[in-house]
Amino acid sequence: MQRERISDNVFWFQSDIYAQVTAGVIVGPQWSVLIDTLAMPDETLAMRSFIEDDLRAPVRYIINTHSHADHSWGNCFFPGATIIGHAICRSNMLENETAALEESSKHNPALKNVKIIAPHITLRNGTLTLKVGKKTLNIFASDGHSDDGISILIEEDRVLFAGDAFLPLPYIVNGDLHKNVATLQMYHNLTLENIIQGHGDIILRGEIDAAIENNITYLTAIETYIEDHADSMSIQEIITEASIEEFGKERILLGGLVDSLHKRNLVFLYQKCQNQHHKEKDIAPL
Ligand SMILES: [Zn+2]
């Protein structure tokens, strides 16, 4: 697990074993706020021991940026903590994640002590504010990657924890491309020092505008490409033709994982487009 100090009392963690997934902690005088857990129990426990033994600030709150396993399944390792998340994150965890854990733990003994703990405090609209020491955390919805995304802005430091709404390559399968674009545009107005992506490296001040633009351009371009070609090409042809480089991204990001994320984005949009066309054909002309 990688660890870095971002600003006074703010630390960032990144997994060495699962898709460079990230988490963070904001440390107060007596207790701390954790943003997400890591994918595998061993790394979550290593993070806990740093926070509780070295920093001596037990975790009182965990904010889950969304419900996906790699960000939320470690909640159970902080039994005294109150969990905060989107209202839909709560229902997703109680339903989808509980079923997914049951399935995954059959094949992965590392998950045997994992239990799903859904958010106790939820929000849907507006901003929830949490004070920890001298820091103010503004927590607000930011969907697109998923329907239950939230971001956390550390007001004094202008550091944004974006969860998977910001990734080296936007990933919108089972999410909503337009909502992800709207979230990215909203980030543009926040005057940020850092963006902490749900996976990958910290984005620094000088890189932020270009990184946001690059992700918006990518999303807009894949949508246009699919709309223009879904009628005349098969999905196999599209996957061969529409390489990740065509859309301004490098395939080496996230240890090469982004190439398969890109292909899955194309398949998702293609299927959506096909369904839409079928629906339109079903409507009888007046
Ligand atoms: Zn993730």
Image (cartoon, grey):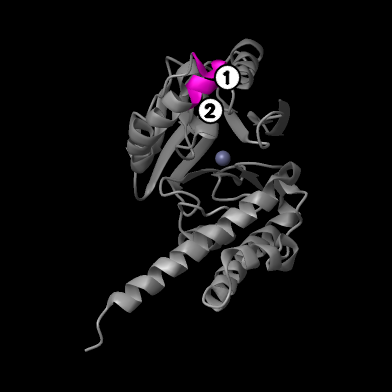
Q: Quadrant of residue 99?
A: top left
- Report if residue 149 is visible in the image: yes
Q: Amino acid at mark 2?
A: Leu
Residue at the bottom extreme?
286
- Residue visible at 33% across and 41% down? 87
Q: Quadrant of residue 45?
A: top right
How packed mark 2 is, by other alpha carbons closer than 10 Å (few <14, some 14-19, many 20 or more), is many
Q: Magenta stretch containing residue 241, yes or no?
A: no
Q: In the rendered view of the protein, which quadrant contains the N terminus?
A: top right
Q: CA distance from mark 2 to mark 1?
A: 15 Å
Relative placement, left or right, of 102 versus 51 is left
The residue tagged 1 is 41
Dot placed on the residue nearer the N-terminal end, 2 or 1: 2
Q: Secondary structure at mark 1?
A: helix
* Residue 44 in the image: above or below residue 202: above
* Residue 263 in the image: above or below residue 42: below
Residue bounds of the magenta highlight: 104-112
The residue tagged 2 is 34
In x, y percent, where is residue 123? 35, 42
- Residue visible at 46% across and 51% down? 174
